[in-house]
Image (cartoon, helix red, strand yellow):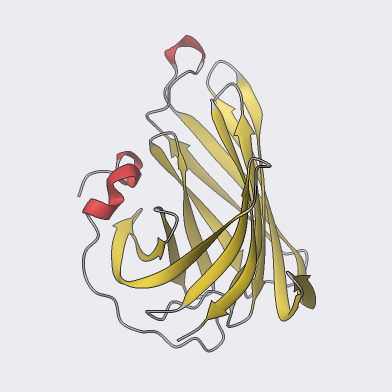
Amino acid sequence: MKKFNYLLIVIGCIVGSCKKNESTADTYLPSTVGSNWTYKMVTAGGTPTTGTFTVSNKDTSANNRTYNVVSGTTGSNQYYSKNTNDYYTLRTVGISALELLILKDNLAVNGTWNTSQVLSGLTGLPAGITSITINTAYKIESKGGSRLVNNTTYNNVIKVRADLVAAVPLVGNLNFGFCEFYFSKNIGIIESNIQIANTTAGVNINEVYTLQSYIIK
């Protein structure tokens, strides 16, 4: 398989083997086939829309990990992977894929971790630069409480914040935005706020998802 950084836009073409159903016990991101979540979505401050995302029976490989393919009625898919206590997702940045380690569910409040990833194939950067390093600092901001989302109260909630900095050759460090995720135990992501933007790198991801309903198989 070719390097993933150049394949996210055609990832549907390389989805492969069927995946086994997994137990939803003690997980913050259920992956049983057929489980689905319907979100109210606001992108770039626009008019709210609705989209449903369903765990398919397919998976794909990226960065030496197996990702569940979660199919969306919006025409785009989401990708999630879990390894013991670590939860990953992918976001498109240009023609590259930014991998976020969005949760370590065994950490206590104020627990932190960091990741670093090189994104290649970018355009519009100074001096013809085509790659940057994204350094991400994560923190568990709350754990075990409740949160009201779209008039529904969810319990056993973990909030994670991620702050991103881009290290750009010849330029230095640039603020790359932040992400916030709220996970409810055995339900999944009940709310997310992704604000990844940088004019120098030509990146602008502005989206807020709030859960409206869900079915866990």
Q: Percent x, y for residue 103?
A: 60, 65
Q: Residue at x 44, y 27 (%)?
A: 131
Indicate the quadrant where residue 135 lies. Answer: top right
Q: Percent x, y for residue 164?
A: 63, 42
Q: Percent x, y for residue 184?
A: 65, 76
Task: Tally the numbered discs.
Answer: 0
Q: Considering only vertical position in the picture, is 31 above or below 40?
A: below
Quadrant of the snapshot with the C terminus? bottom left
Q: In the displayed structure, does residue 177 sit left or right of residue 69?
A: right
Q: Considering only vertical position in the picture, is 157 above or below 208?
A: below
Indicate the quadrant where residue 153 lies. Answer: bottom right
> Which residue lies most toward the top here?
127
Q: In the displayed structure, does residue 118 sit left or right of residue 107?
A: left
Q: Residue at x 47, y 10 (%)?
A: 127
Q: In the displayed structure, does residue 38 sit left or right of residue 22?
A: right
In terms of depth relative to the viewer, which is nearer, 212 or 180?
212
